[in-house]
Image: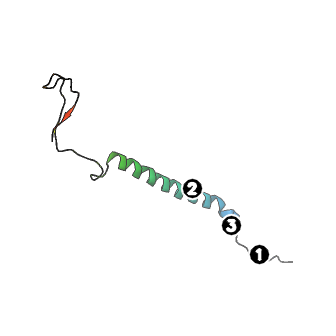
């Protein structure tokens, strides 16, 4: 008696599908991690605040008080 099979042999493809799935998961996480590191090293210029005023550090002020930091505008 001949046996008729109508289902696909998915079991034979299981190692291949597992490797392909793990490849795509690793690819997704590597892109996410690399882009996060890139944005930490090179932040957007709109986020970084650059001040135009020079910062001066002085030990004593004109009035005789000790001043740690002054910012001039």
Which residue is outermost to the top? 64
SS type, badge 1 = loop
Foreground label between 1 and 2: 2
Percent coordinates x, y for residue 64 in the rendering: 16, 22
Which x, y percent locates residue 35?
A: 40, 52
In the foreground, 33 or 60: 60
The residue at the point 64 percent across, 58 percent down is 15
Task: Name the outermost residue toward the left.
Answer: 62
Residue lying at 77% horizontally and 75% vertically, measured from the top left: 5
Quarter-wise, where is residue 4 in the image?
A: bottom right
Q: Classify the position of the N terminus by image quarter.
A: bottom right
Residue matched to label 2: 22
Residue drawn at the location 17% of the way across and 44% of the way down: 52
Mark identifier at residue 17: none
**Within 10 angstroms of label 3, few (less than 14), some, or many (20 or more) residues?**
few
In the figure, is residue 3 to the left or right of 68? right
Q: CA distance from mark 3 to mark 2?
A: 17 Å
Element type where label 2 sits in the image? helix
- Label located before the other in sequence (3 or 2): 3
According to the picture, the residue beneath numbered tag 3 turns out to be 10
Task: Residue under label 1, please give it.
Answer: 5
């Amino acid at each position: 008696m001949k046996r008729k099979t109508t289902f696909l042999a998915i079991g034979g493809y299981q190692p291949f599908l597992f490797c392909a799935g793990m490849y795509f998961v690793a690819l997704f996480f590597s892109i996410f991690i690399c882009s996060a590191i890139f944005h930490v090293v090179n932040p957007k210029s709109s986020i970084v605040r650059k001040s135009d005023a020079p910062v001066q550090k002085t030990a004593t002020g004109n009035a005789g008080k000790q001043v740690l930091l002054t910012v001039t505008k």
